[in-house]
Image: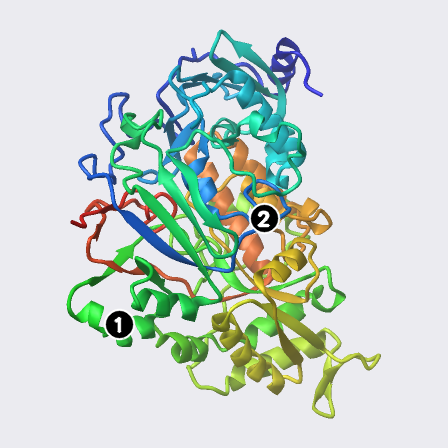
Amino acid sequence: MRIGAGAAGAIFALLFGAGNAVAEPQHGISMYGEPALPPDFVSLPYANPDAPKGGRIVFGEGGGYDAFNPYILKGRAPWGLRVHVYETLLGRSYGESFTLYGLLAESVETGPEREWVEFQLREEAAFSDGTPLTVDDVIWSFETLAEKGLPRYQTAWDKVASYEKVGERGIRFTFSEQDNELPLILGLRPILNPRDWDGRDFAESSLDVPTATGPYTVGDFEPGRFIEFQRNPDYWGKDLPFNAGLNNFDTIRYEYFADGDVIFEAFRAGETSTFRELNPARWASEYNFPAVQDGRIVKSEIPHSRPSGMEGFVFNTRRPLFQDWRVREALIQAFNFEFINQTLNGGVYPRRTSYFSNSFLGMDHGPAEGEVRALLEPFAGDLLPGALEGYSLPTTDGGERNRANLRRAAGLMEDAGWSVQDGVLKNADGQVFSFTILVTSTAHEAIANLYIDALKRLGVQADIAVLDNAQYRERRNVYDYDVIINQWGLSLSPGNEQTLYWGSNGVTEPGTRNYMGMDVPAAEAMIETMLTADDRETFVAAVKALDRVLMAGRYVVPFWHQDVSYLAHKAELKYPETLPIYGDWLGFLPEVWWSEAE
């Protein structure tokens, strides 16, 4: 239930105090400081405003799809719907850590303490069928996503105390608590067409084609095999400076294949336009086929400055087997990173040393100091070893046996009540230490097999279950697994999504990304500090402190990460010389690319 705007404003003033600054509409908004681009900017700095329009690009994708609503738990929707068909009030610049500029909204305005945000819609904004976008469409979208959409939409909406229309095209949201990211979060909510759901339930999946505001519409498709997106020549926003040099292809097609090896062969055969190589050994040795040799295929390496994020074996601490941190540390010690990285990648990739490594947000590995320590000290009695003292992943000499780390692992297991009996690790009750790793790809199966070989030397009985994508997602959504391989992509602007990743609600609430099942008050406190920080220094300290809590939790056996992206693509496909700081990430391919095919 939403209360009146006046009452909500009074509540916020009592809680947080009133500011003295005078608010005014702006062309953009940044998490901290001012937007880098002026109101009269010509284009995003990493886009080519002179890029030609036309041509097509074909991607190879694994798995398939069976629905066209990407904002609910049910069904599998093509990723391209989010990117090409739907739009938001504000658009993100990937040339800055977290800055948004007007898209469907021509301006954004916040209160002096960001206790409210107001958007003014563009008069020309319209759906692909020509129907003008209205404030009522925005309200319906926000309410429907919160009530029936993915869980993350409810999290932010719970902090909205009220909303009100302002004139013909304005809407103001007033907040019930301090959260400096909320204006930006609401600016990035997808705007839907209520008429698409006339007579049907939003929460039920279907293949009804959406009518949205974005630059592309859904073209030909066959579920599980392919889908095409066609550039809309009547797109309302084609002349916006924000869109200059973006959305250049006439057709974007996604072909679906069984696995990565098949996708690569399809690329070699010329059936797809690009291939993102994850195996540096193959990048170095197997790109010698005729299309590369004669120049029809180009190899591009795209560097980036974004956080490494986290990928690895995730322990489900909802299972009693993994609730002791010493057990988790032992299993981390048993992972012979240097040997596995050399075997699978030629030793090229650096390891993910923390969740925010490879960036200024990553934790320091020595003892916590300064503001980071001050933020963690109140929780000192509950923090796991390493959070304050410093924590680093184990290293090896690169040999296959990993004897020193396995000895440490065996000692930790014994401390936790597990010992080897007749070659098998058991506890005092005779329970065998055994678990199953769920995987969906041959690449992950290869990592798991090498890991299991090492675990055998520890007396651990582990096996692998290979699932298709649908089975895997279903079990992951309800946390029905012992160990999975998961990747969390993290940005330079972490915020509310961190609650979805690490918040205690995710222990039981399905559909979150708290796959390890952690319930740590210190982590939630660091997220709260991130969201309410009044300056960049406090924000950075809170992220570094959160990084320490996550690493000391020992929830994941970290893999490697790519500090450069390997992209093979047809020679006629081009991209700008100026790269976004995020590199080959969201907003890059195909958004700023173009075709120079004859």
Q: Nearer the viewer, residue 106 or 553?
A: 106
Mark earlier in primary sequence (2, 1): 1
Circle 1: element type: loop
Which residue does the image show at 62% across and 52% down from the upper left? 514
Which residue does the image show at 61% across and 30% down from the upper left? 197
**Rendering colour mode:** rainbow
Question: Left or right: where does residue 285 sit relative to residue 172?
Answer: left
In which image quadrant can residue 5 be found?
Answer: top right
Give how far across and how far down residue 284 sits, in percent: 27, 73
CA distance for labels 2 and 1: 37 Å
Give how far across and how far down residue 300 sits, in percent: 24, 59
Circle 2: element type: helix
Bin the neighbour count of mark 2 within 10 Å (Cα to Cα): few under 14, some 14-19, many 20 and up.
Answer: some
Q: Amino acid at mark 1?
A: Tyr
Give how far across and how far down residue 330 sits, in percent: 61, 74
Q: Nearer the viewer's eye, disc 2 or disc 1?
A: 1
Q: Amino acid at mark 2?
A: Tyr
Residue identifier under label 1: 287
Q: Nearer the viewer, residue 461 or 274?
A: 274
Farthest residue toward the top? 167
Q: Nearer the viewer, residue 170 or 309?
A: 170
Residue identifier under label 2: 501
Which residue does the image show at 64% across and 78% down from the upper left? 463
Farthest residue toward the bottom? 422
